[in-house]
């Protein structure tokens, strides 16, 4: 009985560690997608900053990191006419953590203003 309990605890700890590791990788991937986008933004005065809507998602990508396939979706949302040139940029990352844990997701956002 004690042996079965120890095995069950070890399996549970291993799953938890894998989920934590996958979440850490997903957060890093989301940050990388955000940074690459931010550094590729056009200069102030470009017509990009005057748009009132963007495609949904604006960008999407996939990346195989270790045994896990991560999908990213970048969304842009103009913050209205009261603040022209102000955008909310959101990166959603999703991945499958396996049959036992299902699909996982996280999201990061940043406000952007024309440089």
Image (cartoon, rainbow, N blue to C red):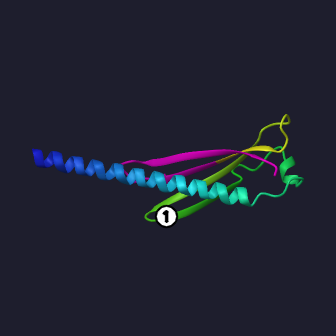
Give the magenta-colored segment's residue range: 91-115
- What x and y, as percent, mark residue 50? 87, 47
Q: Hey, which residue is sitting farthest top in the picture?
A: 82
Q: Is residue 4 left or right of residue 71?
A: left
Q: Quadrant of the N terminus?
A: top left
Q: Where does label 1 land, which residue?
A: 65
Tally the marks.
1
Taking the spot 58% from the left edge, 54% from the top edge, the residue there is 30
Taking the spot 81% from the left edge, 52% from the top edge, the residue there is 115
Most prominent secondary structure in the magenta stretch?
Answer: strand
Task: State whether residue 40 is above or below residue 55.
Answer: below
Q: Is residue 80 left or right of residue 6?
A: right
Question: In which quarter of the view is residue 60 placed?
Answer: bottom right
- What x and y, as percent, mark residue 93? 56, 51
Secondary structure at badge 1 equals strand
Q: Hey, which residue is sitting farthest left in the picture?
A: 1
- What x and y, as percent, mark residue 75? 69, 48
Front residue of this view, candidates 57 and 84:
84
């Amino acid at each position: 009985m004690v042996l079965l309990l120890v095995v069950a605890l070890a399996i549970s700890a291993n799953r938890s560690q894998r989920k934590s590791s996958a979440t850490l990788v997903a957060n890093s991937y989301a940050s990388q997608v955000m940074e690459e986008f931010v550094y590729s933004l056009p200069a102030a005065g470009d017509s990009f900053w005057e748009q009132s809507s963007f495609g949904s998602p604006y960008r999407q990508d996939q990346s195989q990191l270790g045994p896990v396939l991560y999908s990213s979706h970048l969304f842009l949302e103009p913050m209205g006419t009261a603040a022209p040139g102000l955008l909310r940029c959101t990166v959603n990352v999703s991945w499958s953590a396996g049959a036992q844990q299902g699909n996982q997701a996280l999201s990061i956002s940043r406000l952007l203003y024309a440089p």
